[in-house]
């Protein structure tokens, strides 16, 4: 006895057949076990897979990072990083992330007391933290990237009015004075170290015994 087939059952069976054919073409090895109930779980696994965020070439600038800590004269290499400009104007910020771990090393914004300077393909940023200065050196790939980095830092870190009694120009002068004093102390410390090395070398030469001339040397006769 043949049972009548309803229109809805025929349409659902056709949809299941089309879906099974599509899944069979995409993955022939799972054609025998993959059903329509597995499709949502497949999509969830695809969307849940972690993927690194793409780099925006217009906002991201690859750099090599060096840091000079307070009371230090030597630079420390921190590795490769990516400078990103997030937002423009008032909410603008500029984080520096590690290129390998994507960890944020430092973030600058409108409230940051910084002073950027260009030196060749380097941009040296003096960051004032109280009475101390931490210097960051960012090495770009070419001169155009250097100019873009310098403009991005000046745009993101443009000083706002921090207090009713201090204007923007006064804030800039204060930051410049702190960085200038730190540079003077660093140069004086380096000059004193060079003077100590020169004095030690001169003392070592003066305390060394004089060499005996060849004319006064005793002649030893071998028998």
Image (cartoon, rainbow, N blue to C red):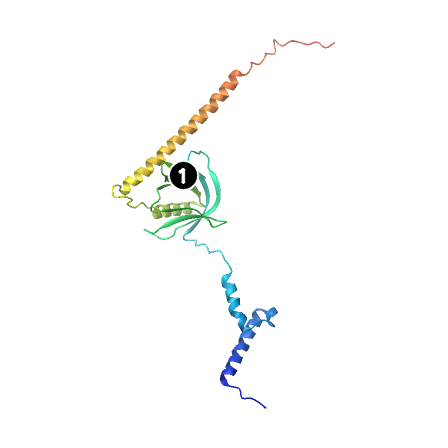
For image coordinates 47% across by 38% down, the residue present is 76
Q: Which of 168 and 43 is in front in this view?
A: 43
Question: Is 158 displayed left or right of 137 in the figure?
Answer: left
Report the residue that reaches farthest toward the bottom: 1
Using the image, determine if residue 215 lies above or below residue 140: above
Residue 167: image x %, image y %? 26, 42
Q: Is residue 120 visible?
A: no
Residue beneath the point at 37% across and 49% down: 93
Q: Quadrant of residue 130?
A: top left
For residue 182, say whether it is visible.
Answer: yes
The answer to whether residue 6 is above or below residue 129 is: below
Question: Which x, y percent locates residue 214?
Answer: 61, 11
| Residue shown at 52% from the left, 64% from the top | 45
Question: Who is closer to the viewer here, 50 or 213?
Answer: 50
- Give the camera-side residue of 49 and 218: 49
Asked if residue 121 lies left or right of residue 23, the reply is left
Quarter of the image containing the C terminus?
Answer: top right
Residue 27's x, y, as percent? 58, 69
- Residue on which disc 1 sits: 134
Residue extending furthest toward the left: 165
Please tell me how many numbered marks the rendered image carries: 1
- Give x and y (percent) for residue 196: 46, 24
Q: Judging from the image, what secondary structure is the residue with disc 1 in?
A: strand
Picture quadrant of residue 146: top left
Q: How crowded is mark 1: few (under 14 residues within 10 Å), some or many (20 or more)?
A: some
Q: Work out which residue is located at the far right of the displayed protein and give it.
A: 223
Question: Quick one: quadrant of the N terminus?
Answer: bottom right
């Amino acid at each position: 006895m043949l049972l009548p087939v309803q229109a809805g059952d025929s349409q659902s069976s056709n949809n299941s057949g089309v879906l099974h054919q599509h899944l069979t073409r995409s993955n022939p090895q799972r054609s025998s076990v993959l059903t329509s109930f597995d499709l949502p779980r497949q999509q969830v696994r695809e969307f849940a897979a972690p993927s690194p965020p793409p780099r925006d070439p217009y906002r991201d600038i690859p750099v090599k990072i060096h840091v000079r800590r307070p009371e230090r004269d030597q630079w420390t290499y921190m590795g490769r990083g990516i400078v990103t400009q997030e937002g423009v104007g008032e909410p603008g910020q500029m984080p520096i992330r590690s290129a390998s771990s994507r960890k944020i090393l430092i973030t600058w914004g409108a409230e940051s007391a910084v002073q950027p300077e260009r030196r060749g393909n380097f941009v040296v940023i003096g960051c004032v933290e109280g009475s101390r200065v931490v210097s960051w050196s960012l090495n770009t790939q070419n001169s155009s990237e250097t100019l873009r980095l310098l403009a991005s830092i000046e745009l993101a870190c443009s000083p706002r009015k921090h207090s009713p009694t201090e204007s923007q120009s006064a804030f800039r002068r204060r930051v410049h004075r702190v960085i200038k004093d730190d540079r003077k102390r660093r140069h004086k410390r380096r000059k004193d170290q060079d003077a100590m090395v020169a004095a030690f070398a001169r003392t070592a030469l003066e305390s060394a015994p004089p060499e005996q001339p060849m004319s006064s040397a005793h002649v030893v006769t071998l028998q």
